[in-house]
Image (cartoon, rainbow, N blue to C red):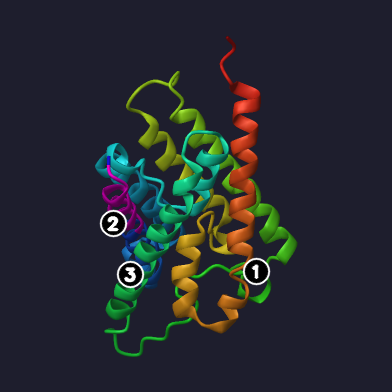
Protein backbone atom coordinates (compact mmCIF):
# COMPACT_ATOMS: atom_id res chain seq x y z
CA UNK A 1 0.00 0.00 0.00
CA UNK A 2 1.34 3.46 -0.93
CA UNK A 3 2.60 5.55 1.96
CA UNK A 4 0.27 8.43 1.04
CA UNK A 5 -2.78 6.17 1.39
CA UNK A 6 -1.56 4.79 4.70
CA UNK A 7 -0.97 8.30 6.01
CA UNK A 8 -4.47 9.31 4.94
CA UNK A 9 -5.84 6.33 6.86
CA UNK A 10 -3.84 7.28 9.97
CA UNK A 11 -5.10 10.85 9.77
CA UNK A 12 -8.69 9.69 9.47
CA UNK A 13 -8.34 7.07 12.19
CA UNK A 14 -6.72 9.41 14.70
CA UNK A 15 -9.34 12.02 13.90
CA UNK A 16 -12.07 9.54 14.80
CA UNK A 17 -10.26 8.39 17.97
CA UNK A 18 -10.00 11.94 19.32
CA UNK A 19 -13.46 13.00 18.19
CA UNK A 20 -15.06 9.92 19.71
CA UNK A 21 -12.98 9.55 22.85
CA UNK A 22 -12.40 13.17 23.80
CA UNK A 23 -15.82 14.11 22.45
CA UNK A 24 -17.47 11.81 24.97
CA UNK A 25 -15.53 13.54 27.74
CA UNK A 26 -16.16 17.11 26.60
CA UNK A 27 -19.75 16.80 25.39
CA UNK A 28 -21.65 13.78 26.71
CA UNK A 29 -19.99 13.54 30.13
CA UNK A 30 -21.05 17.13 30.82
CA UNK A 31 -24.60 15.82 31.28
CA UNK A 32 -24.67 13.37 34.23
CA UNK A 33 -28.24 12.42 33.44
CA UNK A 34 -27.06 10.70 30.26
CA UNK A 35 -25.14 8.16 32.32
CA UNK A 36 -21.89 8.64 30.37
CA UNK A 37 -19.44 9.69 33.05
CA UNK A 38 -16.13 8.04 33.88
CA UNK A 39 -16.97 4.58 32.59
CA UNK A 40 -18.55 5.85 29.41
CA UNK A 41 -15.48 7.87 28.47
CA UNK A 42 -13.27 4.81 28.98
CA UNK A 43 -15.59 2.71 26.85
CA UNK A 44 -15.73 5.38 24.13
CA UNK A 45 -11.95 5.29 23.67
CA UNK A 46 -11.98 1.52 23.50
CA UNK A 47 -14.82 1.47 20.99
CA UNK A 48 -13.21 4.03 18.69
CA UNK A 49 -10.01 1.99 18.51
CA UNK A 50 -12.01 -1.21 17.97
CA UNK A 51 -14.07 0.24 15.12
CA UNK A 52 -11.14 1.88 13.37
CA UNK A 53 -9.00 -1.25 13.68
CA UNK A 54 -11.56 -3.11 11.60
CA UNK A 55 -11.99 -0.14 9.25
CA UNK A 56 -8.37 0.77 8.47
CA UNK A 57 -6.22 -1.90 10.09
CA UNK A 58 -5.68 -3.55 6.71
CA UNK A 59 -4.58 -0.22 5.23
CA UNK A 60 -2.25 1.46 7.70
CA UNK A 61 -2.07 -0.92 10.63
CA UNK A 62 -4.31 1.46 12.60
CA UNK A 63 -1.64 2.89 14.90
CA UNK A 64 -3.50 6.17 15.66
CA UNK A 65 -0.82 6.96 18.22
CA UNK A 66 2.85 8.01 17.97
CA UNK A 67 3.68 5.70 20.89
CA UNK A 68 2.22 2.70 19.04
CA UNK A 69 4.22 3.57 15.93
CA UNK A 70 7.43 3.86 17.95
CA UNK A 71 6.77 0.63 19.85
CA UNK A 72 6.14 -1.33 16.66
CA UNK A 73 9.24 0.16 15.06
CA UNK A 74 11.39 -0.66 18.10
CA UNK A 75 10.11 -4.24 17.95
CA UNK A 76 11.12 -4.49 14.30
CA UNK A 77 7.55 -4.57 13.00
CA UNK A 78 7.49 -1.16 11.31
CA UNK A 79 10.04 0.73 9.14
CA UNK A 80 11.96 3.38 11.06
CA UNK A 81 11.93 5.63 8.00
CA UNK A 82 8.13 5.92 8.23
CA UNK A 83 7.87 6.77 11.94
CA UNK A 84 7.98 10.55 11.49
CA UNK A 85 5.43 10.66 8.62
CA UNK A 86 3.05 8.55 10.72
CA UNK A 87 3.53 10.87 13.70
CA UNK A 88 2.73 13.92 11.58
CA UNK A 89 -0.42 12.30 10.17
CA UNK A 90 -1.58 11.30 13.64
CA UNK A 91 -1.06 14.75 15.15
CA UNK A 92 -2.81 16.42 12.19
CA UNK A 93 -5.81 14.11 12.49
CA UNK A 94 -6.02 14.66 16.23
CA UNK A 95 -5.84 18.45 15.91
CA UNK A 96 -8.54 18.56 13.23
CA UNK A 97 -10.79 16.54 15.54
CA UNK A 98 -10.05 18.89 18.45
CA UNK A 99 -10.92 21.91 16.31
CA UNK A 100 -14.25 20.39 15.30
CA UNK A 101 -14.94 19.37 18.89
CA UNK A 102 -14.27 22.94 20.01
CA UNK A 103 -16.65 24.34 17.38
CA UNK A 104 -19.39 21.98 18.55
CA UNK A 105 -18.79 22.50 22.28
CA UNK A 106 -18.63 26.29 21.99
CA UNK A 107 -22.13 26.30 20.49
CA UNK A 108 -23.62 25.68 23.94
CA UNK A 109 -24.62 28.83 25.87
CA UNK A 110 -22.28 29.48 28.77
CA UNK A 111 -19.58 27.20 27.40
CA UNK A 112 -16.27 27.37 29.22
CA UNK A 113 -13.35 25.46 27.78
CA UNK A 114 -11.82 24.40 31.10
CA UNK A 115 -9.49 21.45 30.70
CA UNK A 116 -11.07 20.37 27.39
CA UNK A 117 -10.17 16.67 28.04
CA UNK A 118 -6.48 17.62 28.23
CA UNK A 119 -3.93 15.69 30.27
CA UNK A 120 -2.14 17.04 33.31
CA UNK A 121 -0.40 16.41 36.60
CA UNK A 122 -0.35 18.26 39.90
CA UNK A 123 -3.10 20.86 39.95
CA UNK A 124 -4.12 19.86 36.42
CA UNK A 125 -4.56 16.20 37.31
CA UNK A 126 -8.21 15.16 37.90
CA UNK A 127 -7.15 13.65 41.22
CA UNK A 128 -4.28 16.09 41.86
CA UNK A 129 -1.64 13.39 41.40
CA UNK A 130 2.03 14.40 41.40
CA UNK A 131 4.37 14.62 38.42
CA UNK A 132 6.10 11.40 39.52
CA UNK A 133 2.80 9.54 39.84
CA UNK A 134 1.73 10.75 36.39
CA UNK A 135 5.07 9.78 34.87
CA UNK A 136 5.00 6.27 36.30
CA UNK A 137 1.35 5.81 35.38
CA UNK A 138 1.80 6.86 31.76
CA UNK A 139 4.96 4.81 31.24
CA UNK A 140 3.43 1.67 32.75
CA UNK A 141 0.06 2.06 31.01
CA UNK A 142 1.69 2.59 27.62
CA UNK A 143 4.08 -0.31 28.21
CA UNK A 144 1.12 -2.57 28.96
CA UNK A 145 -0.80 -1.27 25.96
CA UNK A 146 2.07 -2.03 23.58
CA UNK A 147 2.64 -5.46 25.09
CA UNK A 148 -0.99 -6.29 24.35
CA UNK A 149 -0.73 -4.87 20.82
CA UNK A 150 2.47 -6.78 20.08
CA UNK A 151 1.00 -9.98 21.48
CA UNK A 152 -2.39 -9.66 19.81
CA UNK A 153 -0.81 -8.95 16.41
CA UNK A 154 1.85 -11.65 16.70
CA UNK A 155 1.63 -14.11 13.78
CA UNK A 156 1.14 -16.87 16.37
CA UNK A 157 -1.93 -15.19 17.89
CA UNK A 158 -5.47 -16.21 16.83
CA UNK A 159 -6.32 -14.34 13.63
CA UNK A 160 -9.01 -11.66 13.65
CA UNK A 161 -9.22 -11.01 17.38
CA UNK A 162 -6.53 -8.33 17.76
CA UNK A 163 -8.92 -5.33 17.51
CA UNK A 164 -11.07 -6.72 20.34
CA UNK A 165 -8.10 -7.29 22.64
CA UNK A 166 -6.64 -3.87 21.88
CA UNK A 167 -9.96 -2.03 22.32
CA UNK A 168 -10.64 -3.74 25.65
CA UNK A 169 -7.10 -3.00 26.82
CA UNK A 170 -7.48 0.70 26.04
CA UNK A 171 -10.78 0.75 27.93
CA UNK A 172 -9.09 -0.80 30.98
CA UNK A 173 -6.21 1.67 30.77
CA UNK A 174 -8.67 4.57 30.89
CA UNK A 175 -10.50 3.08 33.86
CA UNK A 176 -7.19 2.94 35.74
CA UNK A 177 -5.60 6.23 34.77
CA UNK A 178 -8.33 8.81 34.15
CA UNK A 179 -8.10 9.96 37.81
CA UNK A 180 -4.32 10.31 37.54
CA UNK A 181 -3.67 12.10 34.23
CA UNK A 182 -7.00 12.01 32.39
CA UNK A 183 -5.26 9.23 30.42
CA UNK A 184 -2.92 10.00 27.60
CA UNK A 185 -0.85 6.99 26.43
CA UNK A 186 -1.10 8.88 23.14
CA UNK A 187 0.97 12.03 22.44
CA UNK A 188 -1.19 13.03 19.45
CA UNK A 189 -4.35 12.97 21.54
CA UNK A 190 -2.61 14.98 24.29
CA UNK A 191 -1.27 17.58 21.86
CA UNK A 192 -4.64 18.22 20.24
CA UNK A 193 -6.40 18.88 23.54
CA UNK A 194 -3.60 20.96 25.07
CA UNK A 195 -3.65 23.33 22.10
CA UNK A 196 -7.20 24.33 23.01
CA UNK A 197 -7.02 23.97 26.80
CA UNK A 198 -4.37 26.67 27.12
CA UNK A 199 -0.84 27.45 28.22
CA UNK A 200 -0.90 25.62 31.55
CA UNK A 201 -1.60 22.34 29.77
CA UNK A 202 0.88 23.12 27.00
CA UNK A 203 3.61 23.57 29.63
CA UNK A 204 2.93 20.03 30.85
CA UNK A 205 2.64 18.48 27.40
CA UNK A 206 6.28 17.33 27.42
CA UNK A 207 5.37 14.61 29.93
CA UNK A 208 2.66 13.23 27.66
CA UNK A 209 5.15 12.81 24.86
CA UNK A 210 8.05 11.55 26.95
CA UNK A 211 6.25 8.99 29.12
CA UNK A 212 4.21 7.23 26.39
CA UNK A 213 7.23 7.08 24.07
CA UNK A 214 9.42 5.62 26.83
CA UNK A 215 6.78 3.05 27.76
CA UNK A 216 6.29 2.08 24.11
CA UNK A 217 10.02 1.77 23.41
CA UNK A 218 10.47 -0.42 26.50
CA UNK A 219 7.68 -2.71 25.30
CA UNK A 220 9.21 -2.81 21.84
CA UNK A 221 12.43 -4.08 23.39
CA UNK A 222 10.83 -6.37 25.98
CA UNK A 223 8.31 -8.30 23.86
CA UNK A 224 10.81 -9.67 21.30
CA UNK A 225 13.33 -10.40 24.06
CA UNK A 226 10.85 -12.46 26.07
CA UNK A 227 8.59 -13.98 23.45
CA UNK A 228 10.53 -14.22 20.19
CA UNK A 229 9.86 -17.57 18.60
CA UNK A 230 12.76 -20.01 19.01
CA UNK A 231 14.28 -21.40 15.81
**Badge 2 vs badge 1, beta-carbon distance below 8 Å:** no
Label 2 or label 1, whichever lies nearer to me, is 2
Magenta segment main secondary structure: helix
Q: Secondary structure at mark 2?
A: helix
- Nearer-N-terminus badge (3/1): 3
Residue 68 at what x, y percent from top left?
Answer: 49, 46
42 versus 129 height, above or below? above
Magenta residue span: 2-14
Residue 39 visible in the displayed image: no
Q: Quick one: label 1, few (<14), some, or many (20+) residues within 10 Å?
A: many
Residue 21: name its quadrant.
bottom left
Q: Residue at x 58, y 61 (%)?
A: 209
Residue 199: name its quadrant.
bottom right
Q: Say which residue label 2 marks.
A: 12
Residue 139 visible in the displayed image: yes
Query: Which disc, if any, is residue 96?
Result: 3
Amino acid sequence: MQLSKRLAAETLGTFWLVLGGCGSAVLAAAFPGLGIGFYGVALAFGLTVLTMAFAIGHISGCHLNPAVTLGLSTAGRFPKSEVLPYWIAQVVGACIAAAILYLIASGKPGFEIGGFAANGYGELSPGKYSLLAALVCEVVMTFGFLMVILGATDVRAPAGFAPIAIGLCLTLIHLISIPVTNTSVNPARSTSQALFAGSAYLHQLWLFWLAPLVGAALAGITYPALFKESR
